[in-house]
Image (cartoon, grey):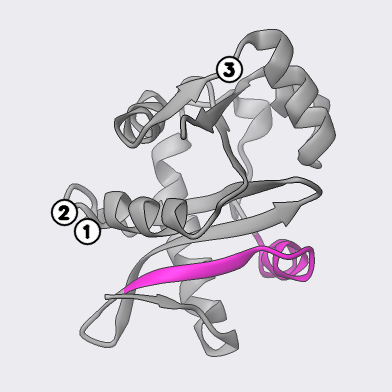
Amino acid sequence: MIRDCTKADFSAIETIINEAAQAYRGVIPDDCWHEPYMSGSQLQAEIDEGVNFSGWDDAEALRGVMGLQRVRDVTLIRHAYVRRADQGRGIGSRLLTELTGRSAERLLVGTWADAVWAIRLYQKHGFKLVSRQEKDRLLQTYWNIPRRQQGVSVVLEHAR
C-alpha cells in the first residue's frame, strides 16, 4: 500500500535511495557519482526544503519511495527509488500514478539523461521530454543542482 512517510521512516528512505541509486554507477559521469549517493544530512536538507515522501509499504517494510516538492508554481517529482530486489514489480509505477494524481499544478521530473529506464518509466506515465533550451531554463528555475549535473540531465513534463 502507498502511505505518507514519517520521521520514523528516515533511515529506510535513506537506505532505499542509496541502494537503488547503485543502478546509476557507471551510467552517469564518474564526476557526478559519490558514495553515499545521498547522505543523511543531504536527505534531511531535501526534507527541510519541502520534499514530502510517500512510500510503498509491503508487510511493514518500505519497498520504494518517491517525493513531491512544491516549488513556486510547479510540483516536482523528487527522489524516486525502489529497492533493487523489488524492482520490476510495478512499485515505481504505482507510486508515480498516485503522486501524479496528487498534483493539479504543472508536474515536472528531472533525471539523468543516460538513465533510459527512468525516462521510459516517466514516458509510460504520460511525461514528455522538454526541449534542451526549456530543460536548462527549468533546471535553473526550479532545482538547486550543480551546473555539471544540469548538463547531463533531462526534464520531463506531465502531459495533462
Label 3: which secondary element: loop
- For the residues labelled 2 and 1, the Cα–Cα distance comes to 6 Å
Q: Of the residues shown, which amino acid type is indicated by label 3?
A: Val
Residue at (81% x, 25% y) in the render: 147
Residue 55, position in %: x, y?
40, 70
Q: Nearer the viewer, mark 2 or mark 1?
A: 2
The answer to whether mark 2 and mark 1 are in CB contact below 8 A is: yes
**Which structural element holds mark 1?**
helix
Residue beneath label 1, please?
Answer: 86
Image location of residue 25, percent across then percent down: 47, 35
Residue span colored magenta: 39-56
Is residue 48 shown in magenta?
A: yes
Within 10 Å of disc 2 (Cα), the crowding (few <14, some 14-19, many 20+) is few
Estimate the x, y position of residue 18 in percent, counting from the top left: 49, 57
Residue at the spot of label 3? 130
The local crowd at label 1, few if under 14, some if 14 to 19, many if 20 or more residues have their Cα within 10 Å, is few
Number of marks: 3
Where does residue 15 sit, x and y in percent of width and height? 47, 68
**Residue type indicated by callout 1:** Asp
Q: Which mark is residue 89?
A: 2
Dot 1 and dot 3 residues touching (CB under 8 Å)? no
